[in-house]
Image (cartoon, rainbow, N blue to C red):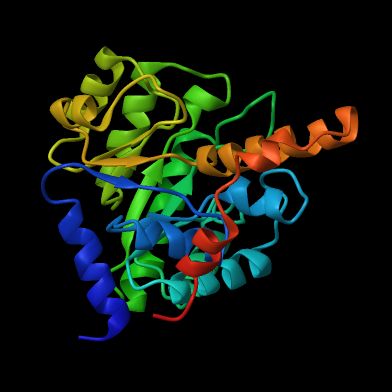
Amino acid sequence: MTDVSARCHEFRKLHEAGCFVLPNPWDCGSARLLAGLGFSALATTSSGFAWSMGRTDNHVSLEETLAHLRSIAHAVTVPVNADFEGGFATLPADVLPNVAAATATGIAGLSIEDSSGDPSNPLFDFTLSVERIQAARRAIDDSGTGILLTGRSEGYIVGRPHLTETIRRLTAYAEAGADCLYAPGIRTQSDIAAVVAAVAPKPVNVLVSDDFSTVAKLAEQGVRRISVGGALARSAWTGFLQAANEIAEKGTFTNLARAVPFADINGFFAPK
């Protein structure tokens, strides 16, 4: 078994029982640190990566994203799931080769979302959305990698928080070949329970970007996977902005005194 196929196998096993946290690094350093803390798998974040390049979310090219996936996957030994946005294309025929390119980066999982980027019609048409998942499924199957495919429905974060439609889409994505289902933005106990039941026995990912729940509570609800999206990156930027604003506005440095010591961070990255 190759290293990549071993990671894909390991990643699939994580989805078979229990509940695990899939934190989202935005560069090689944050990926190595999270892996060092003992997390069993990681996931990239499109927003965190975009911010690290001084851009807004969804404004990074396919080529830049592929290079980013390759660098993160090779920086750690644990499985890495790719936030592949909408597949960097609209038509299924164009999603397929893009996903095929991603399968060669060393990732163990990949997600495709159904947001269109059009504020007046923020979700792709239902049939088109299903066909996009089918295209991603074909690309992964043709690669022979065993990469785990996650189907995402974005209604709750693009102004269409309709549970019935979200479930309709997620169940269709499951039938189209998605291995894991994900509706970022669902957060009430009843909504989470409804989604978990609707797509069972396939696993569900829940996004946690604040303190609305805990790992234990989500596990009790049958959630298999928890990710944090860009929240860790936002937390890092929060500390940076607090310290930088203090210097710029007050000319004082108290926030710097609260920072993790240089030796601790430098030591973490020292060759073992």
Whether residue 44 appears in this view of the structure is yes
Query: Which quadrant, please, contains the N terminus?
Result: bottom left
Q: Position of residue 63 (x, y in %)?
A: 66, 70
Task: Give the residue drawn at x 23%, y 20%.
Answer: 194
Look at the picture and state if 103 lies above or below 215: below
Q: Position of residue 235 (x, y in %)?
A: 57, 37
In the rendered image, which quarter is residue 9 located in?
bottom left
Left or right of 169: which side holds 251?
right
Nearer to the camera, 182 or 209:
209
Left or right of 16: which side holds 59?
right
Q: Position of residue 122 (x, y in %)?
A: 61, 29
Look at the picture and state if 55 lies above or below 30: above
Query: Which quadrant, please, contains the C terminus?
Result: bottom left
Left or right of 259: which side holds 10?
left
Task: Give the residue drawn at x 19%, y 55%.
Answer: 14
Total marks in image:
0
Look at the picture and state if 126 lies above or below 134: above
Left or right of 146: which side holds 17?
left
In the rendered image, which quarter is residue 115 located in?
top right
Nearer to the camera, 201 or 226:
226
Whether residue 109 appears in this view of the structure is no
Nearer to the camera, 84 or 198:
84
Q: Position of residue 102 (x, y in %)?
A: 49, 70
